[in-house]
Image: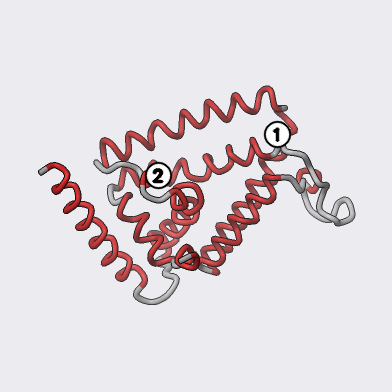
Amino acid sequence: MAWEVFDVEKQFAFYGAYHRNSINFLIHTIIAWPVFFSFLLLTAFTPALGLLPFPPGTFPFQEYMILNLSFVVAVVYAFVYIMLDKKAGTLAGALCLLCWVGSNALAQSLGFSLAWKVVLVSELIFVTPAVIGHGVFEKRTAAVLDNLIEVFVMEQFFVVLEVLQNFFGYEPYPGFQKAVQARVQANIKEWTVKKQEKSA
């Protein structure tokens, strides 16, 4: 069902099952937000509907708060993240909006003819270690083959949530981590059985 997208326990367990290896997780922690930023950089060149309807000088860097496709993407992502968990989601949503402003600022500085080349090179730089992380360290293909939403929407939020858990002991609710680990083990067991059946 559609509302299962906002089931943070289920979604985080799915992510965790593909990122058990510490090196693979570190790789994704480093690249998740730059990949999102580079996508917003391209969408920053879409037609602008205008600026935020506030007097000049209301916000720092207000000239880069352009209402274009990058704004729509950032707001949609922020909404999804807040629906998943209000505290971690608010932090991730704020990062989305910072990426929106930053991408518009960089777009104006670079211009399209240079920006798309920067995006292309950065994607190659980021995607290559991700493939290596899954193939060499995780020994499991990326989740893109099983869940497009998790790869293109959820990863940035899960990186934030994982960092909050590891460094601050944060949980969306008591028992969250234990419940997630149980789901991760079940996911891995199911994957192992299917892998053995295919190789039999």
**Pair 2/1: label in front:** 2
Q: Which of pointers 2 and 1 lies earlier in the amino acid sequence?
A: 1
**Camera-nearest residue between 83 and 145:** 145
Q: In this view, does 47 lie to the left or right of 163?
A: right
Disc 2 marks which amino acid? Val
The quarter in which the N terminus is drawn is bottom left
Please provide percent x and percent y for residue 43.
Answer: 66, 39
Q: In which quarter of the image is residue 127?
A: top left
Q: Which residue lies furthest to the right in this view?
A: 55
On residue 107, the disc is 1
The residue lying at 69 percent from left, 49 percent from top is 71
Q: Is residue 52 left or right of residue 198?
A: right
The residue lying at 58 percent from left, 41 percent from top is 37
The residue lying at 59 percent from left, 53 percent from top is 95
Disc 1 marks which amino acid? Ala
Please provide percent x and percent y for residue 126.
Answer: 46, 34
